[in-house]
Amino acid sequence: MRSGTKVAVIGGVFAVVVGGVGYGAYNVLDGLGDSGVGGGKDITAASEEVRTGPVTKQETAETSKKFLAAWAKGDAAGASQLTNNEADAESLLTQYSESAHVTKAVITPGTATGSKVPYTVRATVSYKGKTKAWSYESDLTVVRGLTTGHALVDWKPAVVHPELRAGETLETGEASTASIEAVDRNGQVLSKEKYPSLGGILDELRKKYGEKAGGSTGIETWINSANADGIDKTLLTLAKGKPGRVPTTLDAKVQAAAERAVKKFDKTSVTAVEPSTGAIRAIANNPASGFEPARSGAVAPGSTMKIITAAMIIQNGLGNANSAVECPSTVPWEGVTFHNLDEFSMPHPTLKTAFARSCNTAFIKPVLPLGAGKRDTALRDEAGQYFGIGQVWRTGIATVDGKVPASEGAETAASYIGQGKVQMNPLNMASVTATAVNGRFRQPYIVAQSLDNRVFATANPLPGGVSAQLKEMLHYTATAPEGTATQAMARVGGDKGAKTGSAEIGGHATSDSWFTGFSNDLAAAALVQSGGHGGDAAGPVVAEVLLAGP
């Protein structure tokens, strides 16, 4: 938690803008007249039926206008009565002036889409003689009250600020953590304004390493985390402290490419690492704030998992890159039938060509000879002993480690093609590709191990020849006419390779799109949630990141 004296604001100037013209809040409210659109405490007359059904366009306009006007005036009690959660709304709206020290605010509504109303807030924050302008965008949704039938603002903290979540609070004061100046591998300053996806990472680096870096505190507006050990999120800096310098492994050029690439699709994340060292070169998400799937996701990786499955097949003597395999359209496994996409089959494939076409059955059927006990643990052992998956990674920031547990029955076969209980995120999969082409796992990291003497995870090197075969298979998939990654990787030059993946997620009509690839000494992986086939959505994201590499 940070320090900050809570002083009520007296005589603050607030306004709501309608049609581009600013009015005093009282004028806006008076001008509405008696619309019959009341707040949470309004009592419906006995002769009046309680309205039901969706809110009307007029109700949306009138309710949002009243709410924004009351908020802009600084009338937390009045604004909260226009919501469907009066207690929580009044608490957070009161904080806006008393704790966040907002002394002026002009709120400009945009054009409503159905019952959703966007708006821009232009505020002024003042604390101990320091004043600074603060602007941002958010939105609200108008719904019908369950008991009164009145149109009400559907309350959530993001109404006040888009990055606020349940249990979090706003505050302005002297920061408790020292300022930092995070720099990339070449000394270029990294800011959340230029690289939006780094906002959460920079806040985390500040909390962990600010004092070690010798920085001093400043005056800021921030979001207090809902968790005692969570990371506060700085929203505005009124007075800078002396920043301590924190070197990172990020590459500004690659990070910029990652920021551009994730904007291609909604719910997109990508990570890039250096195979020879494990250094994280880029990490980006769209949306940029909030949950960060690139490092914190845990979902099925689909056929990108076949990289580890191929290594397992080779190491257990079940085949090699150029040995013949079978690729029927379906294969049974303990009462469950597994299919290829559109039930395609291949007449005389090798493991390499089946990998390039992403034949599911060719990565399930060869494992049958291992026997029940070995089959259920072989993938877990391969992932942990050689790819560092399932170990604890200490990257310098919070990350979620990959998970490849032992399984049984049909889940065992599903895990070979990246389904079942296997869970990964783009950081995990970028590392898997990096291990495959480097021949040895190097734990990903974003700040030097020497900064806090943390212990890195280690794994055995891949046995002789396995890495070369995996690299050959990845290269073929990215260059052969039948390769599922060829089109996406067409613009990427140099020594390159890739693997596509589509993962079925329960409850989703469309599969997740996965893609992982490498070029020279850079490996990257991307996830586009509900993006469909790997090469179509995630592929172009990875390609753009690799093009910015060495």
Image: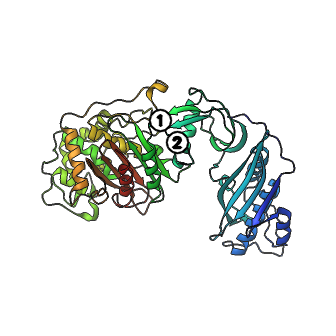
Rounded to the nearest angstrom, the CA distance separating label 1 from label 2 is 9 Å
Q: SS class of the residue under badge 1?
A: loop
In the rendered view, would you say 286 is above or below 427?
below
Quadrant position of the N terminus in the picture: top right
Here the colouring is rainbow
The answer to whether residue 174 shows anywhere in this view is yes
Res 156 quadrant in image: bottom right
CB within 8 Å, label 1 to label 2 = yes
Of residue 329 and residue 434, the one placed in the foreground of this image is: 434
Q: SS class of the residue under badge 2?
A: loop
Res 264 quadrant in image: bottom left
Residue 42, horizontal then vertical, whole percent: 82, 64
Is 503 positioned to the left or the right of 239 in the image? Answer: left
Residue 29, horizontal then vertical, whole percent: 83, 66
Residue depicted at 17% across the width and 44% down the height: 369
Residue 113, horizontal then vertical, whole percent: 62, 70
Residue depicted at 57% across the width and 48% down the height: 193
Quadrant position of the C terminus in the picture: top left
Is 302 positioned to the left or the right of 72 in the image? Answer: left
Q: Residues within 10 Å of mark 2 (few under 14, many from 20)?
A: many
Q: Which mark is residue 98?
A: none
The answer to whether residue 81 shows anywhere in this view is no
- Residue farthest to the front, as pictured: 187
The amino acid on which the numbered mark 2 sits, given as a three-letter code, is: Leu
Q: Which mark is residue 248?
A: 1
Of residue 188 and residue 99, the one placed in the foreground of this image is: 188
The amino acid on which the numbered mark 1 sits, given as a three-letter code, is: Thr
Q: Residues within 10 Å of mark 1 (few under 14, many from 20)?
A: many
In the rendered view, would you say 451 is above or below 526?
above
Q: Mark 2 — residue?
A: 190
Q: How many marks overall?
A: 2
Say whether disc 1 or disc 2 marks the residue closer to the N-terminus.
2
